[in-house]
Image: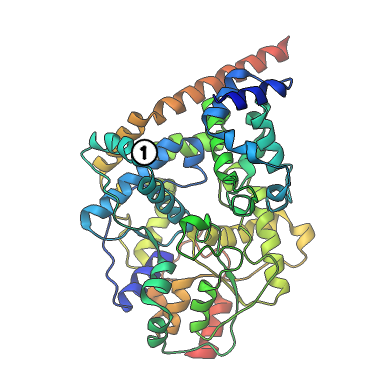
Amino acid sequence: MIEASIRNVFDHLGAEILELPGASCCPAPGVFRAFHIPTWLVIAARNISIAEEIGANPLTGCNGCYGTLRDAWYELEHEYELKKEVNEHLAKIGRTYKGNLEPKHVVQALYLDMGIDYLKDHIKHKFSDLKVAVHYGCHIVKPSDKRPWDGEYEAPRFLDEIVEVTGAKSIDYKDKYMCCGAGGAVRTAVKEVAADFTREKLTNMRDAGVDIIINCCPFCHLQLDLGQMETNNIFSDIIGEPFHIPVIYITQLLGVAFGMDPSSLGLIKNHQLSGVSPFISIDPFLNLVKEQII
Amino acid sequence: MSENVEKYIKRKVYKSTSSRIAQKFVDAGLEKLRACINCGTCTGSCPSGRRTAYRTRSALRRALTGDESVLKDIDIWLCSTCYYCYERCPRDIPVTDMIIKLRNIAVEEGYILDSHFGLANNIFYTTGHGVPANGENNKKWRDLRESYGLPPLPPTVHSYPEAVKECQDLMKAVGFRKLLDNAAKLKEERAKKEEKDKEE
């Protein structure tokens, strides 16, 4: 449960999260922008305008939302005519886009605003032997001219550094920075193509001998988790053993190392529901937590 | 249309070239593609092209020459927008953004997959969310949220019906409603025509 872990970890770190009342879909950059760019831009501007109303930076834990909010913000900051047009539309619903607030990713807030040292100060337990496959996803680093990572996109390290604060080891694997396959409307278009991206990633991760996958995007999370199950079904004839690599969101891992209750991080099942995440059991991860840090 | 591009298109007239579509490509800024030196870095960097018939360079070249058939292929919908082509292009062509623009034109011409149309029309336009949590089918997700101490529905459009209306008003104002209705119409006409051609 990604949302619970973000809210509780930020609270633990002393960062206050405010709500964006009436916010809508970002809208998704590879799907809705691909249908109609003007719609994408004006709905994104409306979302940012809600954040402006409460005077706080828009914060998202999703690479897709980040892609949209960040790219829309960048375009509106640089193209005066576009901003004027968007504001003419927003005026019809009594809103204005001013544009002085930078949209941020949860990982950006952790790494650039709080900083590695600040995170280190909160660590209570360290993993002694946890091998992690770090999956960045695409839109947190690209397009790099609209991202805050100094143009680095081929081999960034910021997420690995956050992971290693917990004592876990980030393991190099082939094509580490490759896409999960879900984005750009591909999952909705042809699920098998998305699953084939995922198959390749999972194969490379397994070959490197990792215990878990760490990611920073709910759509990648879904694709690596639910998509892992789909991959096991669709490609059963070529993958050999089915995959069973637990998929964990970055704030879930951090929270455990901060000594927080795993149940507040969405790691312990508080329900009897079926057909909801996690689709691939995370018990192997919880066992490692018990063995190594509790 | 700039004179250069016009000349270029005229020089490379392909079978399925339509000047109306070519004009749309140009209006969408595909002129930038004239900087392309055909190096193939985009195609070589494409994780989708490794497993499908989607070839980035080919799709863009077809667009540049006004070849309408590029809009009909499912190929342009297999780009996962990972942005490697955009980053690595030695001529600084914003390749991924060009593919997005091609998709915009495809939708305008009624080439949109049923699954995408459903997502746009029944989900995004109707609820304001791309991945909604309301409705009977999503009850398990609301229960999941509650089990972790979150409100069953987030304080988004889901909790503010007037905000859904705001989004729909914006979508109408900017032409999204009309675009979807027109795409549905074109799709239906095309399906009918195909049916008729089969009979004959």
Say which of A84 and B154 sits in front. A84
Q: Quadrant of the N terminus of chain A?
A: bottom left
Tell me if I can see residue B32 in this picture: yes
Q: Where is B55 relative to B143, above or below?
A: above
Say which of A55 and A179 sits in front. A55
Say which of A166 and A256 sits in front. A166
Say which of A8 and B13 sits in front. B13
Residue A158 location (% of width, % of height): 51, 73
Task: Specify whether B193 is left or right of B167.
Answer: right
* Residue at the spot 49% in from the left edge and 84% down from the top edge: A166
Task: Specify whether A58 is left or right of B36.
Answer: left
**Circle count:** 1
Residue A289 location (% of width, % of height): 52, 84
Q: Quadrant of residue A231?
A: bottom right
Give the residue at mark 1: A82
Q: Quadrant of residue B171?
A: top left
Kind of residue sitting beneath label 1: Leu
Residue A78 location (% of width, % of height): 38, 47
Q: Where is B42 relative to B76, above or below?
A: below
| Residue farthest top in this picture | B200
Q: Quadrant of residue A195?
A: bottom right
Q: Residues within 10 Å of mark 1 (few under 14, many from 20)?
A: some
Which type of secondary structure does the marked residue at label 1 adopt?
helix
Task: Specify whether B101 is left or right of B180.
Answer: right
* Residue at the spot 36% in from the left edge and 76% down from the top edge: A114
Q: How is the image coloured?
A: rainbow
**Chain at numbered mark 1:** A
Tell me if I can see residue A185 in this picture: no
Residue A236 location (% of width, % of height): 74, 59
